[in-house]
Amino acid sequence: MDRPVVLFLCTGNSARSQMAEAFLKKYAGDRLEVHSAGLEPCGIHPLTIQVMNEVGISLDGHRSKPVGDYLGKLSVRYAIVVCEQAEKACPKIWPFTKQRLFWPFENTAAVEGTESEQLAKFREIRDQIDEQIKRWLAAESLC
């Protein structure tokens, strides 16, 4: 039996969508096929790697991927947009998608301040994404 596919979409695929992909893979194990992509992929932000390492999740092997890698090539059951800019620009209908969800998290790329302040914001957003993933899995009875 094919596993349901979940695709997290963002603009740069550098932070929020990468975090969401990693958390869902951790919690869903092999029950779901999980991916992330960006409209304008720009590489994984170093603070994304750092804050995920802090909670024991390695992003080794992850890379920023363009949405074109998946569009028309993968039957996505859940398309989850995690940023406002991508919400405006992403296809409103993904072929064969059961659900298209919008979970707007603050833009990590726009965080200003000292490195310590930026790190604190990345941690805050990481924790918000973690909690959202757990709530969604429970509500959907996926895990």
Image (tube, rainbow, N blue to C red):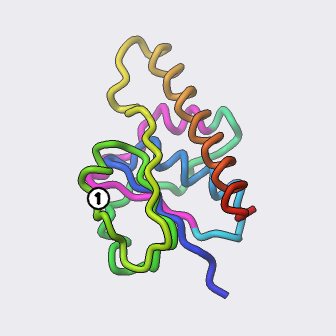
Q: Amino acid at mark 1?
A: Cys
Crowdedness near tag 1: few (<14), some (14–19) or many (≥20) residues, C-alpha within 10 Å? some
What's the residue at 24%, 54% (across, down)?
Answer: 89
Rendered-image quadrant of the N terminus: bottom right
Pick the quarter of the image with the C terminus: bottom right
Residue 35 falls inside the magenta stretch: yes
Q: Is residue 134 shown left or right of residue 117?
A: right
What residue do we see at 33% from left, 64% from top?
Answer: 67
Image coords of residue 130 (percent x, y) = 63, 41
Q: Is residue 123 above or below residue 75?
A: above
Q: Which residue sits at x=33%, y=42%?
A: 84
The reply to whether the magenta stretch includes residue 88 is no
- Can you give x and y, in whole percent of width and height, for residue 77 in the image? 51, 72
Residue assigned mark 1: 90
Indicate whether 125 appears above or below 82. above
Above or below: residue 72 compared with residue 135? below
Q: Where is residue 10 drawn, in percent x and y?
A: 37, 50
Q: At x 36% / y 71%, what residue is drawn?
A: 94
Q: Quadrant of residue 107?
A: top left
The magenta segment: 34-52
Location of residue 108 by image quarter: top left
